[in-house]
Structures are given as structure tokens and as C-alpha cells.
């Protein structure tokens, strides 16, 4: 069984979707929710699920922060061999040491079709660019910003009357479906990773 850590900074709606999935599917064991933000609304949701929550407050030094994070991960038996770390609205960049150690074992969700509109405010970027479609991407995390191997993507249409708020809502609905799917593929060993390319066994 894979041990799962979920890292959040805010609302925690993706975390909730993942925890619901874990409770029904029972192919991964969520052991801890970690946040850099004491006020993250998701902390309360995690507690309702009976999951331990740990706050590691922000500090500037990435190395020191990541070391603290690693210590917590190991304490909860989330190792580079048996662990999966899901970033779900976690507003920090992880450094090269940690992302190398947990290579292809850290996932992130981003609210655009990467590589378009990486970074902050992806939905606003898509609206301002005049894109006709956007969506969300689940990818493995490397040392870059939203640059790791793409696992799954889902698309939404942008209508003329959409703004970044309505687009974010549409995308979020897709996010809640996509993250559990990606975790399921990972846990059932359906992902074949070759450098930047992730292939999915029996994917149609
Ligand atoms: C989502 O839009 C996700 O794509 C982005 O941050 C947001 C987190 O939302 N990385 P929530 O905390 O899961 O509700």
C-alpha cells in the first residue's frame, strides 16, 4: 500500500476529493496533511477525515524548509520507496534536493493545460490571452515551476462571457475528478515514466 501525504495552503477542495477517493477505493493510505499556513481552511476538513495535520510555517530558506518537510514525511513513513506526495494548492516551490529524492513521487495539480499558463493566476492568464480552451494538468514535480512530466489533462471550453472566476469554477470541477484518476493510475502501477514522457497502460 502506498502512503500518501497531501500538502495544502488554502481551501483544500482537491484534498477533500482525494481523501474521499482514498476512503472509497482503499488503494492508498493518507497518513498526513501538511500545510505551510495555519489558517488554511483545508486543515479543518482534514481533521474531519481523522487525518493528522501538521503545520510547517513558511520560512524563506528553501533548503531548511524542505528538510523540515522531509523530516515530517519520514516520520509518517512516506519514503521515496513507498510514498506519494500530492500538492493540492500548496503555495511553495520545492527545491531540487527534495524533488530529486522523491522523483516521480510528487504530483501537483495546475489549473491550465500546461505548458500554457504556468505559474500564478493561470485562469486569469488564459482569459487575458484570449484562449478558447483551458483546463487542468496533473504532473510530477521537478525542480522547475510546473515543468515536470505530465500525467493527465482535462480540457474546458472558454466562452465569450467567461471571466477568470467562472473559468476557475469550471476547471475546479474537472480538477476534483482528475486528481483521484491520476492517483489511481499511480497506485495501480499503470504509469510508465520515461524521462518527460508518461505513458498510461491500456489508456484509450
Ligand atoms: C486549484 O485551482 C489548483 O489547481 C491550484 O490551486 C487551487 C487549489 O484549490 N494548484 P483547493 O485548495 O484544492 O480548493
Image (cartoon, grey):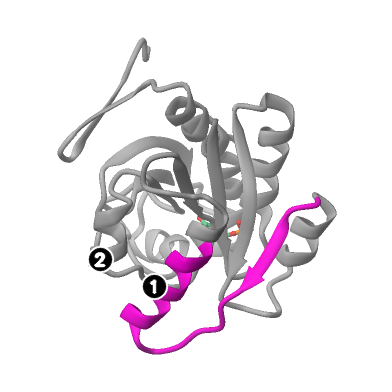
Q: Name the residue carrying label 2.
A: 97
Pointer 1: residues within 10 angstroms few (<14), some, or many (20+)?
A: many
Residue under pointer 1? 66
**Within the image, what quadrant is residue 203 found in?**
top left
Residue 166 in magenta?
Answer: no
In the rendered structure, which disc, 2 or 1, sits on the residue that comes first in sequence? 1
Instruction: Judge left or right: residue 40 versus residue 159.
Output: right
Asked whether mark 1 lies closer than 8 Å to ligand 1, one says: no
Residue 14 visible in the displayed image: yes
Quadrant of the rendered image containing residue 176? top right
- Residue pictured at 51% horizontal, 47% vertical: 159
Check disc 2: other Cα within 10 Å, few if <14, some if 14-19, many if 20+.
Answer: some
Q: Residue furthest left?
A: 195
Tell me if label 2 and label 1 are in contact, CB under 8 Å: yes
Quarter holding the C terminus? top left
Of the four image quadrants, the one with ligand 1 is bottom right
Q: Secondary structure at mark 1?
A: helix
Magenta stretch: give its range. Answer: 50-72
Q: Examine the rendered structure and indicate whether residue 149 appears above or below residue 102.
A: above
Please state if 95 lies on the left or on the right of 186 as rendered: left
On screen, residue 148 versus residue 8, left or right, reads left
Rendered location of residue 180, percent (x, y): 57, 35
Q: Nearer the viewer, residue 199 or 166?
A: 199
Element assignment for label 2? helix
Q: Which residue is located at x 23 percent, y 66 percent?
A: 96
Q: Give percent across and percent down for residue 121.
A: 44, 69
Left or right: 174 in relation to 24: left
Membership of 67 in magenta stretch = yes
Name the residue at 73% across, 66% down: 43
| Picture layout, residue 180 above or below residue 88 | above
Amino acid at each position: 500500500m502506498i502512503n500518501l501525504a497531501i500538502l495544502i495552503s488554502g481551501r483544500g477542495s482537491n484534498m477533500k476529493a482525494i481523501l474521499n477517493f482514498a476512503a472509497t477505493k482503499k488503494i492508498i493510505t493518507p497518513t498526513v496533511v501538511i500545510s505551510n499556513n495555519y489558517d488554511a481552511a483545508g486543515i479543518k476538513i482534514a481533521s474531519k477525515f481523522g487525518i493528522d495535520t501538521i503545520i510547517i510555517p513558511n520560512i524563506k530558506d528553501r533548503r531548511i524548509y524542505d528538510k523540515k518537510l522531509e523530516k515530517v514525511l519520514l516520520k509518517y513513513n512516506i519514503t521515496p520507496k513507498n510514498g506519494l506526495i500530492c500538492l493540492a494548492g500548496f503555495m511553495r516551490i520545492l527545491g531540487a534536493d527534495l524533488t530529486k529524492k522523491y522523483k516521480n513521487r510528487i504530483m501537483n495539480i495546475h489549473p491550465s493545460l500546461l505548458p500554457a499558463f504556468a505559474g500564478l493566476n493561470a485562469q486569469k492568464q488564459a482569459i487575458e490571452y484570449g484562449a478558447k480552451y483551458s483546463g487542468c494538468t496533473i504532473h510530477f514535480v521537478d525542480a522547475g515551476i510546473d515543468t515536470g512530466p505530465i500525467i493527465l489533462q482535462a480540457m474546458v471550453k472558454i466562452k465569450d462571457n467567461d471571466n477568470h472566476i467562472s473559468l476557475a469554477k469550471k476547471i475546479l470541477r474537472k480538477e476534483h475528478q482528475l486528481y483521484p484518476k491520476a492517483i489511481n493510475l499511480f497506485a495501480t502501477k499503470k504509469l510508465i515514466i520515461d524521462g518527460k514522457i508518461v505513458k498510461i497502460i491500456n489508456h484509450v
